[in-house]
Image: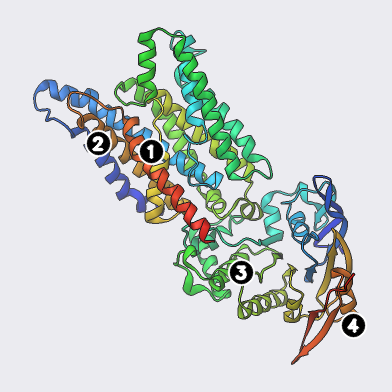
Amino acid sequence: MVALLELDQATVLAGDIPILDQLSLEVGEGEMVAIIGPNGSGKSTLIRALLGLAPLDQGTARIEGRPLTTLTARQRAASMAWLPQEGLSAERLRVEDVVAAARFRFNETRQDCLAAAYRALEDAGADSLADRWINELSGGERQRIELASMVAQESKCWLLDEPANHLDPVWRARTLKFLSRRLEQGNTVLVVLHDVHLLGHIEAAQTRVVGLRQGKIAWQGRLSDTDLGEGLETVHGIPFERAVAGDREYWIPGEEPLE
Amino acid sequence: MKALIRWLPWVVLAITIAVATAWIGPTLDDPHGQWILHELRLPRALAGAMVGAVLSAAGAVVQILLRNPLATPSTIGTTAGATLGVLAVLVFGSGSTWMGLPILPAAAFAGALLVTLIIASVAARDRARTEDVLLAGIALTLATGAIASGLRLGIDQVTSLSALRWSLGSLTIIGPDRISMLAPFVVISLAGMLWLIRPLEVLISGIERARTRGVEVTRVRTLGLGLASLGVAACVATCGPIAFVGLICPHLVRRIVGSAPRTLLPASILLGAVFLPLCDSIGRVIWEQREIPVGVITAALGAPVLFMIVVRRGRTQARR
């Protein structure tokens, strides 16, 4: 079976320094992948490379077996929706317009577009926000709009770059819960998590954890693997301790070994 | 269709106000006055409305494409390029057509397009920040301005004076023939920009986001800047560089109806179509016996607006 998303020996350079270093990764349909790794390990670049936002200096990115560079922007949008790290723009825009704009790839009337945007808002629990200005929303409300926009785009795969950033604990948990729901509904989810703690909020035990270090995959395994702790240590270079709270499992970073 | 009906009353209102500006000033009851009204003031109001609409729309489009409220055809150098083109014709040129093209708009468009293409190539680089684009625009404006001043030295005083007068931006010399020359450019440019509204709606949320939602950003940006340049060039060729319309009108509109291009662009067009004839009428009557070029009026109103935007942006950025 052809992978939905694929990076084949992908290298992205910043000047002479590789941010992604001959990295190969395949993501199958219906899979949930969590990308972890220290700052500057290439997590965001990996997502941007898949989206075509970071052009590859070597190697190939493929979507369902077809090289990314041969696809039109609309075809890419059908396969992948993106939640970037930086938040919504500070422009004075109506929520409904912002969500409707995510449906650019469809050729439909404004009426159909708005109807779909409202359904997406409902799905993200944000239908009451439809006629608010986005620059007047709170962080949690903005997050709902971001998720609604992704729903509205109706892409196969969701690529999220640190979706829990700047959110309070409740909204972090909700966001990850929302992703689990999308997974159940058949989406493929690839999420960059900069905080290892958040792995504890992921419900699907079959989630693949991919650990990056210096632009390469340093470790990968399943969330349910018994050696996840060692994996985290390989990726971050410090030991991690397992902590259990209820039926959840968290990983707490230990002391940095002294030189 | 629905959108058309929704906008219709506003279109009618804008046209009414624009035409009504012709009656501002001393009463014109005698036959001579009637001639002034029909042959001078009405064409002038009409030209003002067309130029205002195009400049305002071009400002809004450039601002969305470059993601900066300070970007306008006059701040990214388009106007300066067109001005240089026209001055070059005034200095070196002879005759009014070249290979069947009216030479003034052709030269203005060539100049505007040249500068805009340089700016667009700066903007198209992957890591270009909008600040880079604005700085490049300022550099190009200064450079073309210097060349233009140099050109002016090379011509006799009478031509120089008329060139100076023209370069202040004025609607005084408008006649029906000029209007018919301007009209097709106005229609193409406005229709083209309105046609881009759908991708612009996505671009307003960020260039990279737009890419991932299916917008061919480079194509839209090239088209948008090209259409804006075309319209601006035609306006500059007709009545000289009129600054700040593209800054003031979209700014006011944004404060009232928000930034969504689907309302911003049509509303900017309408406000521009009202704003410029009004400014021109003020210029006609404010100083008895003399006329102040409309470019001077818009600059006097625009500079404070520019200042305000800069101060406000500084404040919101500091807060983040």
Could you tell me the amino acid type at mark 2? Val
Report if the CB atoms under discs 3 and 4 are less than 8 Å apart: no
Q: Nearer the viewer, mark 3 or mark 4?
A: 4
Q: Is residue B1 visible?
A: no
Protein chain holding label 2: B
Could you tell me the amino acid type at mark 1? Ala
The foreground one among B66 and B33 is: B66
Q: Which mark is residue A226?
A: 4
Going from N to C along the chain, the mark reached first, 2 or 1, is: 2
Q: Quadrant of residue B115?
A: top right
Protein chain holding label 1: B
Q: Which residue is mark 3?
A: A147
The foreground one among A127 and B76 is: B76
Q: Position of residue A88 (x, y in %)?
A: 57, 61
Callout 3 and callout 2 share a chain:
no
The foreground one among B245 and A241 is: A241
Could you tell me the amino acid type at mark 3? Leu
Q: Position of residue B56 (x, y in %)?
A: 41, 40
Q: Which residue is mark 1?
A: B53
Q: Which residue is mark 2?
A: B19
Callout 3 and callout 1 share a chain:
no
| Vertical position of residue B111 compared to residue B255: above or below | above
Q: Position of residue A62 (x, y in %)?
A: 81, 54
Callout 3 and callout 4 share a chain:
yes
Q: Position of residue B180 (x, y in %)?
A: 36, 24
| Vertical position of residue B161 compared to residue B169: above or below | above
Protein chain holding label 4: A
Question: Element under label 3?
Answer: helix
